[in-house]
């Protein structure tokens, strides 16, 4: 960010940068620096260079959208007290903080260079040129959204940075949000982009409106300038534009598999994604290791990032009731009779993981086991076609395993893909999809007091219907469910927030939502508890060993936000991050020290 991106430098960089999409897999041709972006081909090359910066590796060969939720109470890092969402290591020198900051500023810097060099006369622009220019602005808005929602007030530049701007300091979040909401809506209104892009991996008109709705929902939730209701209306309006032109996929699981993503209905839901391909060349990195870092070590993976018990206990039972309210919930068998997305997102003790390690040529199975030195595997290498026993490295392994360092849960989203081996995957990774937009619309309407509007219910119920969960009604959101101390509006608020967590887990949305809802204090009040300890196991739990959702620092807010507490039976549970704590400064990440050394005006006094 602190270097002016001259046109010749941007052109040179285009040749060397890598990316993960077919349309990026080409060499940049040579152009004179003078007027580089004035030509249609030059503009196309410039925007291609921006796209190349989006799929960077945030954490162990995985892009940021896949790991951001780990930096909250809904996920865990591999070792004790290192999860930065729980206060561990959240400093200006933290490597993940620095990586996130630096890579998003690279996107903004290159986008500003392209936009600076573009034609200014609309009459001189072809339709293709105008499309690429709008893409550059959408990509810039995406990077600013991620920075603003993570760091709060940040520098804000809409053109390349010059030396006299090095000490410009931070810009108020409201100024940034207002500018980019307006710009994104103008792009959507201009018809310069298609509603559904003809090329996967590129932003389109739907993406522009979806990002506008993200900005506006964030601004409304934090009541920027005391104008929260105005922003909620902007969020609903932008979301409605997308809802009128794009549809949900028919099958939730199809969104996260290579073959599923080829289907037309999935293409409609995936508004923007990081595109990968199994055909590797020297120009492009085509695969990611998401599954490898999230899976069982017994199956050959390396589990280093885990979902937390707090997330697992957010999922409803099959009757649509929270686990403390449903007669279906059995502590001895917590994975049974749950929202189908529960099993499609998480794996636990007793579940069978189905996978391939040779590109789908053969199907393998392993029973996830959190306690025993051996477990079941299929096929038996000694007797093909039968089950056999194998060493359970998830328990016996000397490194990081989910049984020793996690909370007893593994990620399953993106993992049930038999088309490839899981050590590397070319399945596309969602950045933003229609289900999120539906729930953004519903939440904005609820916050405006329009929770009894038929369109509000429809938006939530369309997502629930696809998941296979009971639909909500206007009286208490679920037929027969009591308000349990909440107003009707609060009950709707609870349900849409729960829906976002269950639908969008491990997609980077919880990270931002947690900040919007300002629930860091109640989520981090106690250590991270997990599955029962070895001496107890699940079979040793009692019928009363069910989390309390109205407890702790603020029982009312815990209830609204489905924050589970385990104090009454914590001695039976695995415990992680005993020193977990929350300070108000954690609402925003610290500005990296390298930037503070360059510009003292960036200092966040809370750090």
Image (cartoon, helix red, strand yellow):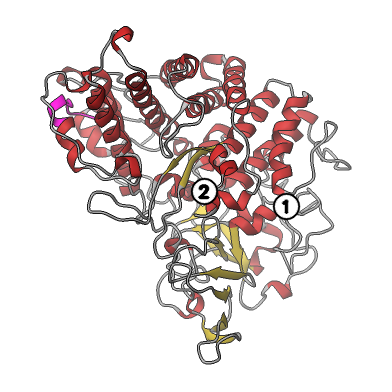
> CA–CA distance between discs 1 and 2?
42 Å
Residue named by callout 2: 262
User: Who is closer to the viewer here, 606 or 89?
Assistant: 89
Which mark sits nearer the N-terminus, 1 or 2?
2
Closest to the observer: 362 or 227? Answer: 362
> Is 8 part of what is drawn in magenta?
yes
> The C terminus appears in which quarter of the rendering?
top left
Q: Is residue 35 above or below residue 592?
A: above
Identify the residue position indicated by label 1 in the image. 548
Q: Residues within 10 Å of mark 2 (few under 14, many from 20)?
A: few
Residue found at x 68% / y 20%: 448
Q: Position of residue 192 (x, y in %)?
A: 43, 19
**Segment tinted magenta in the rendering:** 1-9
What quarter of the picture does the N terminus occupy? top left
Q: Which mark is residue 250?
A: none
Where is 535 relative to 407, above or below? below
Q: Position of residue 191 (x, y in %)?
A: 47, 17
């Amino acid at each position: 960010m602190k270097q002016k991106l001259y046109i010749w430098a941007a052109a040179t960089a285009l040749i060397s940068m890598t990316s993960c999409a077919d349309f990026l897999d080409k060499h940049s041709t040579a152009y004179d620096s003078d007027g580089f972006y004035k030509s249609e081909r030059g503009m196309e090359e410039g925007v291609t260079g921006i796209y190349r910066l989006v799929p960077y590796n945030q954490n162990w060969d995985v892009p940021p959208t896949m790991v951001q939720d780990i930096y909250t109470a809904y996920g865990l890092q591999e070792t004790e007290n290192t999860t930065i969402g729980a206060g561990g290591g959240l400093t200006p020198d933290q490597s993940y903080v620095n990586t996130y900051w630096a890579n998003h500023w690279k996107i903004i810097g290159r986008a500003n260079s392209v936009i600076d060099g573009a034609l200014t006369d609309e009459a001189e622009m072809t339709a293709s040129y105008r499309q690429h220019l709008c893409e550059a602005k959408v990509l810039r808005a995406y990077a600013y959204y991620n920075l603003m929602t993570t760091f709060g007030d940040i520098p804000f530049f809409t053109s390349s940075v010059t030396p006299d701007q090095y000490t410009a300091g931070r810009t108020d979040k409201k100024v940034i949000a207002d500018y980019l909401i307006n710009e994104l809506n103008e792009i959507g209104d201009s018809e310069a982009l298609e509603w559904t892009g003809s090329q996967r991996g590129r932003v389109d008109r739907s993406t522009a409106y979806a990002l506008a709705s993200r900005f506006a929902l964030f601004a409304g939730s934090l009541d920027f300038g005391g104008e929260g209701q105005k922003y909620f209306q902007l969020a609903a309006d932008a979301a409605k534009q997308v809802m009128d032109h794009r549809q949900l996929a028919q099958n939730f699981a199809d969104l996260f598999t290579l073959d599923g993503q080829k289907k037309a209905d999935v293409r409609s839901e995936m508004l923007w994604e990081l595109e990968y391909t199994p055909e590797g060349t020297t120009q492009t990195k085509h695969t990611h290791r998401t599954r490898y870092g999230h899976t069982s070590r017994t199956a050959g993976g390396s589990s280093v990032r885990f979902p937390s018990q707090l997330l697992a206990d957010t999922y409803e039972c099959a009757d649509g009731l929270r686990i403390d309210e449903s007669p279906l919930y059995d502590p001895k068998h917590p994975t049974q009779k749950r929202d189908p997305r529960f099993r499609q997102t998480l794996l636990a003790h007793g579940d069978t993981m189905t996978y391939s390690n040779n590109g789908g040529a053969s199907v393998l199975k392993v029973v996830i086991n959190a306690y025993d030195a051996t477990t079941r595997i299929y096929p038996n290498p000694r007797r093909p076609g039968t089950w056999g026993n194998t060493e359970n490295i998830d328990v016996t392994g000397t490194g990081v395993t989910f049984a020793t360092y996690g909370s007893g849960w593994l990620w399953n989203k993106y993992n049930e893909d038999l088309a490839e081996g899981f050590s590397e995957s070319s399945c596309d990774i969602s950045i933003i999809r229609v289900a999120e937009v539906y729930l953004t619309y519903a939440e904005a309407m609820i916050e405006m007091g329009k929770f009894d509007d038929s369109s509000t219910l429809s938006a939530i119920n369309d997502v629930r219907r696809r998941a296979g969960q009971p639909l909500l009604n206007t009286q208490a959101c679920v037929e027969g469910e009591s308000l349990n101390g909440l107003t009707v509006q609060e009950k709707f608020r609870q349900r849409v927030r729960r829906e976002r967590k269950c639908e969008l887990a491990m997609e980077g949305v919880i990270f931002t939502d947690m900040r919007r809802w300002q629930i860091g204090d109640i989520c981090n009040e106690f250590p991270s508890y997990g599955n029962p300890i070895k001496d107890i196991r699940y079979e040793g739990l009692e019928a009363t060993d069910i989390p309390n959702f109205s407890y702790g620092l603020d029982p009312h807010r815990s209830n609204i936000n489905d924050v589970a507490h385990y104090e009454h039976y914590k001695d039976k549970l695995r415990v992680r991050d005993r020193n977990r704590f929350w300070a108000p400064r954690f609402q925003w990440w610290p500005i990296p020290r390298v930037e503070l050394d360059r510009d003292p005006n960036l200092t966040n006094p809370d750090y």
